[in-house]
């Protein structure tokens, strides 16, 4: 028996399955037209960066950085499963029937996640955590393929029906023991949204904020026009691009299966688990990029559509008016297809030269 692991040494505290597929192109092709401030560091087990155009009415970069980090910390306090003191960890440790009052941030994220679960008929589900752990896509890494009986038993603690959620009083409990939540597919994007709102309050109108590949872009780039970003071609070697788009005042997120997986006996096992089956997805869809006003929802929808596969993802995106870009395998090559709502972002980039 042979096992090949991709990215086995990289396990992110809030999103063990993150795939970085969106790269900044803001400075390509033209010189900067104005000075910028660039900040960054580590958060959520990954990197964050901020590029903004300053003016004299704004606070110092040190104050800006402190405010951004404070916004990021809201997610850590509420939704970081690697922090035993967080609300989500407290809930995951509760026995069946015990109720927990959660905060407003937790409430918003859970309500949005539930909405996507219903729209995808269970393909997206934040109760999938036990299955993620079962398949080894956590801090310890993959070890072996679980037996079918174990997968079936684990599925008994997965699903919204296992939760008792009363949003009007923000009270959450589990109907069966062993249920646990995992917000990694939406929480990082939510942190980006919170920090972007803080930047607005500080009077910073033109910026690109990125955490682990999830972006919020506002106003103009340093070139004086909209921001240009690239969707990475899904190959092991980085640096080639599948497409370039022009965006402003939106969030962008990408999810995919080509960086975080393992192989055993010639079979590839993606980190993207289908909650409906309990198994890693097996289809030709490699990556999904979503453009949405909310980075949190772009983040969640990118994961949800990855589970569905190319045809279902495109059909649902057209029904819901989502701006999505899908890259799928075609033999030894990759092909892309986009929804109607995504087309203007590609067209505006082409028009700008």
Image (cartoon, rainbow, N blue to C red):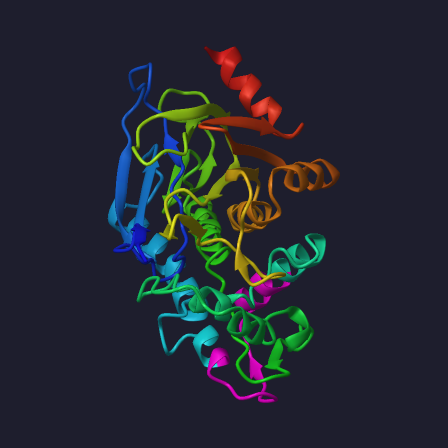
Q: Is residue 261 above or below residue 138?
A: above
Q: Is residue 324 visible?
A: yes
Residue furthest to the front? 1
Indicate yes or no whether the magenta region holds residue 153: no
**Quadrant in the rendering for residue 14:** bottom left
297, 108: nearer the viewer: 297
Q: Which residues are magenta?
A: 91-111
Specify the quadrant that holds the N terminus: bottom left
Image: 231 above or below 81: above
Query: Residue at 25% across / 55% down in the picture?
Result: 9
* Residue at horizontal 29 percent and vertical 33 percent from the top: 237
Residue 108 highlighted magenta (yes or no)? yes
Q: Quadrant of the C terminus?
A: top left
In x, y percent, where is residue 198?
Answer: 43, 51
User: In the rendering, at what x and y percent does residue 29 appear?
Assistant: 33, 14
Q: Position of residue 12 (x, y in %)?
A: 33, 58
Asked whether, in this view, residue 240 is left or right of residue 322, the answer is left
Q: Is residue 182 above or below residue 166?
A: above
């Amino acid at each position: 028996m042979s096992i090949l692991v991709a990215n086995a040494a990289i396990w992110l505290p809030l999103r063990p399955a993150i795939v970085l597929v969106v790269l900044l192109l803001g400075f390509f092709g033209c010189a900067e037209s104005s000075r910028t401030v660039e900040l960054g560091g580590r958060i959520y087990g990954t990197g964050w960066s901020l590029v903004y155009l300053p003016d004299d009415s704004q606070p110092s970069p040190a104050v800006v950085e402190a405010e951004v980090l404070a916004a990021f910390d809201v997610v850590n306090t509420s939704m970081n499963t690697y922090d035993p003191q967080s609300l989500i960890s407290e809930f995951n440790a509760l026995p069946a029937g015990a109720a927990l009052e959660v905060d407003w941030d937790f409430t918003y994220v859970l309500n949005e996640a539930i909405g996507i679960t219903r729209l995808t008929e269970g393909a997206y589900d934040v109760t999938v955590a036990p299955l993620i752990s079962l398949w080894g896509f956590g801090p310890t890494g993959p070890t072996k393929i679980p037996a079918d009986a174990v997968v079936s038993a684990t599925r008994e603690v997965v699903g919204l029906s296992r939760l008792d959620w009363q949003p009007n009083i923000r009270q959450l409990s589990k109907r069966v023991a062993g249920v646990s939540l995992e917000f990694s597919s939406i929480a990082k994007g939510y942190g980006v949204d919170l920090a972007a709102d803080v930047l607005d309050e500080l009077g910073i109108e033109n910026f690109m904020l990125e955490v682990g590949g999830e972006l919020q872009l506002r106003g103009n780039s340093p070139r004086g026009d909209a921001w240009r970003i690239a969707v990475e071609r899904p190959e092991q070697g980085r640096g080639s691009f599948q497409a370039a788009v022009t965006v402003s005042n939106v969030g962008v997120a990408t999810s995919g299966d080509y960086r975080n997986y393992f192989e055993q006996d010639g079979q590839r096992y993606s980190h993207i688990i289908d909650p409906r089956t309990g198994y890693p997805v097996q289809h030709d869809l490699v990556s999904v990029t979503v453009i949405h006003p909310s980075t949190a929802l772009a983040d969640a929808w990118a994961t949800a559509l990855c589970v569905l596969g190319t045809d279902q993802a495109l059909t649902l995106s057209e029904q819901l008016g989502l701006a999505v870009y899908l890259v799928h395998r075609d033999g030894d090559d990759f092909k892309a297809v986009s929804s109607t709502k995504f087309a203007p972002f590609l067209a505006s980039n082409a028009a700008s030269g």
